Image: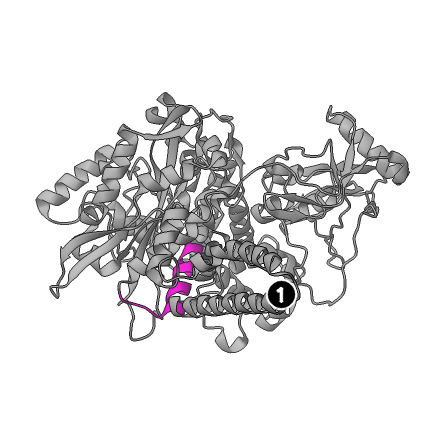
């Protein structure tokens, strides 16, 4: 089985074609046979007694029997026999071919569907995943929105309130090309993929591609011809069965019944409108929003309030009117097949937005470019100056100043907006300029929207910032029309109340799944029955994850007993104070590195002096607080866990007291120095301590929008920036 898994990995993880894999197997077979013959020949020519030779030969033949079985034609010397073995021994959920009928050219049309009931049974066999789904509904803190369970789509849903073991199913649908989208095969092999992930899993697990399950693959042209109703029929039937009958899992000597339903269907705006039955012409249709019935004319008015929100009642009325009049009514074309599900409706709401598409691939690239061009026109700085400051992020040059959009990925645009005020604020001639305020407002909106957790007060703050931003946008650039995505963000506060932080529902991680299918096609160069090839390869890959563990235990093989005398007196004192203040036991073990959730961390807790900083609203940065013209500082040393980073602080015009510089990577206002961070050691109560999600460096550094990465370079100087607070080397020699 181990050798079979090796071949399965070569095929599914490393994209080896069947022809190449067969060549590898043939070579392995030849090598093992040559080794066998060489051993027998050497044994025969030896000086050992014949009875000893016979015993050794028998022992060898018995041990070699496994290889002879592996490489005989029945068990593994052809693709068919290998696939049969893989299916029987790796718990594969086999894709089903669903026939749709005959298409335009009288060709047989079909797609491949992975039964979602079987997939969920497969997942629930894993004890770690099962634990997340047991008694899954927990009433969260009403004032903190930390995940989808905090939102009203679950908290106010009677189905989740009245059942114990409920599966929170999140679907994602998107169209993608597996070939060159600009070549002769454009749209010929364009596929629509539907994926699934369990909302019961914490966000850090949902972001792992291995937890994103394939539901179906279908050619986009088939969906346009037959419609979503026919294509989704098997999935809808299975989902209704899960809600009604549940999924029974046997554990030890008892059985557990899990029921479930869909809580959200993710996708880009086009895909969400298609599957939701809404109009797909965002710029030409009068009604373009799936959340309310605002019109294009109302969008351009200075009154940016949203119109009447869509709900199941008015949606069903518009569906009925559209069917009678055979035309689009208030942006609704037809009823969505998803509405056949109990306890789910696309206007409940059920189609959350993707902040990456709306903000970092929609609003920010255009509006930030308009602002940059304004600053250049007003001679505040030049494009070359900005490129020089940003170093690694190339904006454009003077010859391309006519461009109206910044180029780059969503992550690049996000990072650019973050560091933009820090790169140019010494060139800003008027801090009260509306265009400059527009940049700062956009930056604050993004920092709040990208927060991993929000309080109710921060949601209200976000609503205020969005209203101010849209008002300034119309005022600064009255001749440039607002885009539909400008309106979509006005719904974000209410959508956060429904779904929790929208950062946990963006589609970028799901799109990473597309890359896997593109790589398969690229290496296989096989386009005959592509959906079968792709779905089967994917299911073989997923079958290898059945035994994975997802423990939150810290693994620290090099843990040493904590002896205070081995440390600097300041460090030992601060460790003692930290555990005393947090009412924990005394520190027992110290380690310099740990492994946590398959990630390796070398520095998790940091020690440094504190400093008082204040938010500078004019430039959107933090700077040291000064008393009587002198920088305020203290020599008091404090130990801070990274959990301090996890809490999302709104960007308020308020003084932050006793905050160590590195918690926000605060920037110096004189631009000569960049505040940084250096690490020390992890301190634990005991070996195997369960670490909370908040304490993980990797999570925090990637989740918090306001936190800069240590390898960033935007300053014109190629020097190492000085650290403005004291740190002490306390690593152990272990």
Figure check: 593 above or below 281: above
Where residue 664 sits, quadrant-wise, is top right
Where is residue 149 drawn, in percent x and y?
44, 32
590 left or right of 326 in image: right
Q: Does the stretch in magenta take in 731?
A: no
Task: Residue at 26% x, 45% y: name it.
Answer: 276
Task: Residue at 84% x, 46% y: name it.
Answer: 728
Q: Is residue 343 among the parts visible in the rendering? A: no
- Judged from this view, the residue extending furthest toward the bottom is 399
Where residue 225 sits, quadrant-wise, is bottom left
Q: Is residue 516 among the parts visible in the rendering? A: yes
Bounds of the magenta segment:
512-528
Where is residue 256 drawn, in percent x and y?
39, 26
In the image shown, does 470 or 159 lie closer to the viewer? 159
436 left or right of 327 in image: right
407 left or right of 661 in image: left
Where is residue 638 drawn, in percent x and y?
79, 37
Where is residue 558 drawn, in percent x and y?
75, 43
- Judged from this view, the residue extending furthest toward the front is 50
210 left or right of 432 in image: left
Prevailing secondary structure class for the magenta stretch in the rendered image: helix
In the image shown, does 451 or 432 lie closer to the viewer? 451
Category of crowding for the residue at label 1, using alpha-carbon neighbours closer than 10 angstroms: few (below 14), some (14–19), many (at least 20): many
- Residue on which the image places disc 1: 390
């Amino acid at each position: 089985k181990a050798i079979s898994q090796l071949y399965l990995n070569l095929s599914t993880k490393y994209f080896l074609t069947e022809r190449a894999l067969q060549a590898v197997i043939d070579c392995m077979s030849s090598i093992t046979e040559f080794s066998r013959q060489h051993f027998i020949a050497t044994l025969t020519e030896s000086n050992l007694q014949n009875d000893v030779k016979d015993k050794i030969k028998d022992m060898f033949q018995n041990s070699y029997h496994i290889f002879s079985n592996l490489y005989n034609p029945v068990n593994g010397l052809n693709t068919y026999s290998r696939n049969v073995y893989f299916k029987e021994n790796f718990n594969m959920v086999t894709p089903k071919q669903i026939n749709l009928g005959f298409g335009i050219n009288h060709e047989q049309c079909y797609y491949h569907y992975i039964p979602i009931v079987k997939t969920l049974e497969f997942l629930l066999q894993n004890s770690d995943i099962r634990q997340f789904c047991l008694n899954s509904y927990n009433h969260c803190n009403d004032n903190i929105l930390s995940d989808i369970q905090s939102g009203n789509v679950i908290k106010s849903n009677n189905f989740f309130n009245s059942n114990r073991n409920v599966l929170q199913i999140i679907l994602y649908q998107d169209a993608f090309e597996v070939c060159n989208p600009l070549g002769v095969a454009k749209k010929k092999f364009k596929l629509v993929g539907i994926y699934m992930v369990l909302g019961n899993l914490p966000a850090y697990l949902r972001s792992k591609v291995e937890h994103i399950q394939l539901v179906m693959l279908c050619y986009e042209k088939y969906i346009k011809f037959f419609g979503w109703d026919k294509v989704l029929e098997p999935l809808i039937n299975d989902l209704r069965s899960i809600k009604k009958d549940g999924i029974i899992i046997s554990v030890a000597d008892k059985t557990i019944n899990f029921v479930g339903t869909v809580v959200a269907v993710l996708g880009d705006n086009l895909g969400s409108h298609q599957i939701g039955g809404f109009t797909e012409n965002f710029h030409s249709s009068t009604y373009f929003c799936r959340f309310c019935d605002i019109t294009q004319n109302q969008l351009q008015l200075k009154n940016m309030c949203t119109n009447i929100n869509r709900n199941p009642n008015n949606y069903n009325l518009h569906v009925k009117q559209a069917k009678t009049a055979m035309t689009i009514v208030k942006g609704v074309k037809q009823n969505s097949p998803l509405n056949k599900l109990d306890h789910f409706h696309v206007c409940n709401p059920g189609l959350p937005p993707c902040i990456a598409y709306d903000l970092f691939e929609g609003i920010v690239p255009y509006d930030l470019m308009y602002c940059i061009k304004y600053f250049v026109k007003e001679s505040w700085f030049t494009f070359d100056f900005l490129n020089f400051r940003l170093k690694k992020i190339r904006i454009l040059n003077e010859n391309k100043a006519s461009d109206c959009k910044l180029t780059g990925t969503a992550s690049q645009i996000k990072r650019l907006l973050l560091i933009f005020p820090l790169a140019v604020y010494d060139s800003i001639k008027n801090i009260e300029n509306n265009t400059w305020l527009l940049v700062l407002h956009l930056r604050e909106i993004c920092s709040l929207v990208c927060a991993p957790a929000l309080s109710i007060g921060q949601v209200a703050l976000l609503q205020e910032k969005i209203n101010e931003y849209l008002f300034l946008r119309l005022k600064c650039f009255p001749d440039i029309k607002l885009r539909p995505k400008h309106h979509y963000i006005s719904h974000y506060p209410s959508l956060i109340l429904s779904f929790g932080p929208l950062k946990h529902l963006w589609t970028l991680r799901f799109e990473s799944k597309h890359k896997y299918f593109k790589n398969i096609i690229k290496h296989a160069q096989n386009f005959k029955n592509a959906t079968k090839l792709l779905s089967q390869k994917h299911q073989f890959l997923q079958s290898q994850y059945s035994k994975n563990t997802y423990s939150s235990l810290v693994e620290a093989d090099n843990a040493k007993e904590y002896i205070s005398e081995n440390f600097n007196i300041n460090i030992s004192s601060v460790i003692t104070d930290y555990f005393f203040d947090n009412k924990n036991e005394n520190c027992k073990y110290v380690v310099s590195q740990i492994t946590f959730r398959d990630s390796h961390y070398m520095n998790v807790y940091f020690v440094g002096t504190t400093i008082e900083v204040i938010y500078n609203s004019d430039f959107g940065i933090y700077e040291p607080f000064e008393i009587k013209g002198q920088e305020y500082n203290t020599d008091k040393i404090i130990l801070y866990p990274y959990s301090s980073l996890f809490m999302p602080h709104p960007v308020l015009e308020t003084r932050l007291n006793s905050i160590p510089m590195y918690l926000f990577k605060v920037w110096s206002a004189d631009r000569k120095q960049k505040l940084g961070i250096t690490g020390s050691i992890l301190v634990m109560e005991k070996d195997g301590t369960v670490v909370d999600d908040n304490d993980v460096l990797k999570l925090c550094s990637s989740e918090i929008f306001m936190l800069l990465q240590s390898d960033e370079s935007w300053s014109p100087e190629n020097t190492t920036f000085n650290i403005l607070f004291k740190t002490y080397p306390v690593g152990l020699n272990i």
